[in-house]
Image (tube, rainbow, N blue to C red):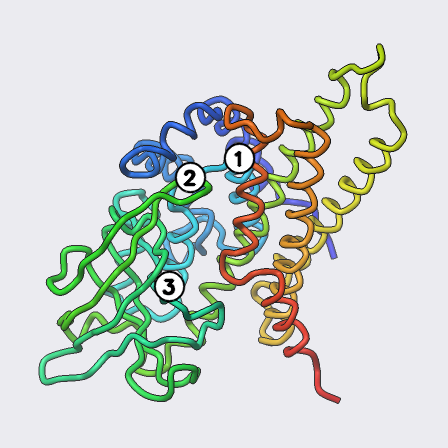
Amino acid sequence: MNFEHTEDRRMLSDMLRRFVAEQYDFATRDRHARSERGYSIELWRRYAELGAIGALFAEADGGLGGTGFDISVVFEALGRGLAVEPVLDALMVGSAIAAAGTPAQRETLDGLIAGALTASLAHAEPGSGYELSQVGARAEWRPGGWVLNGAKAVVTAGEHADLFLVSARNAGAPDDEAGISLFLVGANTPGLTLRGYGLIDGGRAAELEFDGLALPPEALLGEAGAGYPVLERAIGRGVLALCAEAVGAMDCARDATLEYLRTRRQFGVPIGSFQALQHRMADVLLEIEQARSAVINAAAALDHPDRATRERALSAAKYTIGRTGTLVAEESIQLHGGIGMTWELPLAHYAKRLVMIDHQLGDESHHLARFIALAPQE
């Protein structure tokens, strides 16, 4: 299998890396991450102009690529800058709309790709854990449309989103895969309330509540009760994106640590000359390359027709990223010493983001169990 990027993909990667390096330094990122919005709407539109959002979707959906390697290229570059713009949610919501949307609903993709609107995935619920089938919010059909009741938790960039993709159950038990429906809900829909708050690794999220929220029939995405497969594919693309983002962040943490080992002197010599520290750094470098290989494998399997093959590759990558990300975060800070914990040093924020990526869309333990459960039965 040829893992070399196409020329277009290499150009996109170089352009995004250069943009992040020149226009998205840490001071800029930190200012936007701690702002009232939690990200920069101007930079969100710049990413759209550069084709970063369009690269996440196939040409048939109005995009420029849409393969696993296109997603990896974009998010690895974003990970290098710790970008807080809502590109991840645009990918997941847009993927669901592309897979199951009506012609009218698919027009929303044009706005997402152009950076004219933002969308957030509202799936996780208070106390629901990581299982995608754990949905307690209810959707009831009544003459003229649907009525939603329930709550959603940690909806990234939800305070200022224009559109939400909401999962709700219209049939079955709270953990059944069948009976889950997906809805497109406008931010100003009566019956929707939200509470925003800052996230520990920058940016903002919101808690959503639905109290008798009335929706027209055309708000339903796909078939009623058949939303689980659509949700699984969309979140699978999000898992790959997070893994690629983590690789970008790990590369930056690695480079910063190597530079510190070369310049920090003790007993008259650079501390990087100490063999014990060299051994520790060598282990980190090897683990990062193992993680990179897992992401490449997941990107190659993203559109595999066999569900078990696809999902096992994604869970293997997420497990590897969770384990390696924690190692890189711990070792980088320890090799820096006390300065590694200071707020002013970007390294501390890379370490924090790596730890938090492990907890998004399923942590290390969840994906290890999922990988085992998806193994072929003898």
Does residue 76 sit above or below 345 in this rendering?
below
Horizontal side of 69 relative to 257 (left or right) equals left
Q: Look at label 2 and name its amino acid.
A: Gly
Mark 1 or 2, nearer chain start: 2
Viewer-side residue, 168 vs 143? 168
Viewer-side residue, 123 vs 100? 123
Give the mark toward the camera: 2 or 3.
Answer: 2
- Residue under the point 50% across and 59% down: 237
Q: CA distance from mark 2 to mark 3?
A: 29 Å
Q: Position of residue 366 (x, y in %)?
A: 58, 67
Please tell me whether mark 2 sits on a helix, a strand or a loop.
loop
Q: Position of residue 236 (x, y in %)?
A: 51, 64
Task: Return the residue at label 2.
Answer: 202
Q: Is the C-beta separation of discs 1 and 2 under 8 Å?
A: yes
For the N terminus, the image quarter is bottom right
Among the 4 quarters of the image, the one containing residue 52:
top left
Task: Return the residue at label 3.
Answer: 98
Mark 2 or 3, nearer chain start: 3
Farthest residue in the top direction? Answer: 268
Among the 4 quarters of the image, the one containing residue 212:
bottom left
Please tell me whether mark 1 sits on a helix, a strand or a loop.
helix
Horizontal side of 339 relative to 217 (left or right) equals right
- Mark 2, residues whose alpha carbon is within 10 Å: few (<14), some, or many (≥20)? many
